[in-house]
Amino acid sequence: MYYSIEIIRLTAVILITFTHIRHTFESGFMYVFLEQVPLYGTLILSIISGFLYAEVTARKPDLLRKKVRSLLIPFLIANLLVLIPALIFQQFGIDVLNRLEFGLELISTGLLSFDGPPINPPTYFIRDIFIIFVMIETIRTRNIYLFLGVLTFAFFGELLLRYDILVLFILGVFYSRNSDFIRSRKGIISLSLITIGILLFYFESSVNRHVFSLALFILLIDWKVNFMNVGGYSYTLHLYHSPIIVVSYPLVVHYFDNPYVMVFLQVGVAYTLCYIGYQMIQKLNLRFMIGGR
């Protein structure tokens, strides 16, 4: 087992949680830490997804059925658990929908993410990764029904919300397929990527984050370390941290006005409640909510 992946994946999800923290920092270290550094989370997860597909999943039968269980069902549950309370609040005149309109859009976009981020925004990554696996299975099996489904998404909605996820997924696959060659020249390749990233940074190119993410993955993937399997908790945190932060923020801001305390409490509440939720899922045998993890 790649315990290094468990650490990298947990770190990436923790970074993603920072993107949903509300704060008042407009410059300095905290602004960079809360606004710039978290952008690497999704990029790193994309590379890991491609790498694990090539290392493990590609050799298993019934790929799509497994991905429905591990990706699509948790995605739908995580958004339903936000959508249903939002509809209830709407009946009492409390609008918590923000960017979504009350109506068909709640299903097409809010739940199914047909043409935009769902009502539980961080789960868009899971949506895109599932679509990538559908595309892989369509090519592999030449299934006409899957092809029509992909074509429908592409024509009437958005096939992928972020195409850089697909690019980084492919790079993760490429690393797995050429790992012996890359590992033998890890230092040179990593240094080259870091140098390219720095050069792109000075040209203010957003590509530099992708280059740095790939370099970081190459440097850490073979890290020999003893750790634990935190995949279930990482997934729970990814799925549910955003609604927890949204609900807890009014309470935090009501009782505290120190910007550092507000940030600490938001992430602390999210991490703690997600851990409690993960433990309950395990004890009540509700692991289908997190893909059987």
Image: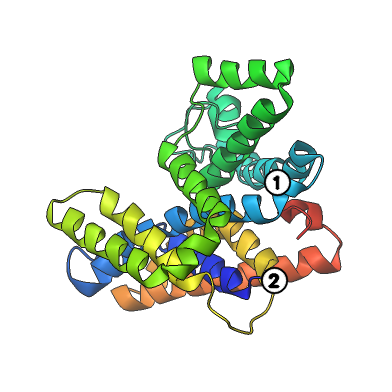
Seen in the image, is 144 located left or right of residue 237?
right
Instruction: Tell me the kind of residue under disc 2.
Output: Met
Which residue matches tag 2?
Answer: 1
Mark seen at residue 194: none
- Where is residue 63? Give x, y as percent: 75, 41
Q: Amino acid at mark 1?
A: Ala
Q: Position of residue 158 (x, y in %)?
A: 48, 25
In percent of width and height, residue 154 lies at: 52, 20
Task: Give the SS element for disc 1.
Answer: helix
Pick whichever, 20 or 233, lies toward us. Answer: 233
Can you give x and y, in whole percent of width and height, for residue 13 in the image? 51, 63
Residue position for label 1: 58
Crowd tier of the residue under label 1, counting other residues whose Cα lies within 10 Å: few below 14, some 14–19, many 20 or above: few
The residue drawn where x is 53% and y is 55% is: 178
In the rendered image, the residue lying farthest to the bottom is 226
Q: Which residue is at a point 63% across and 59% down the rendered structure image?
A: 235
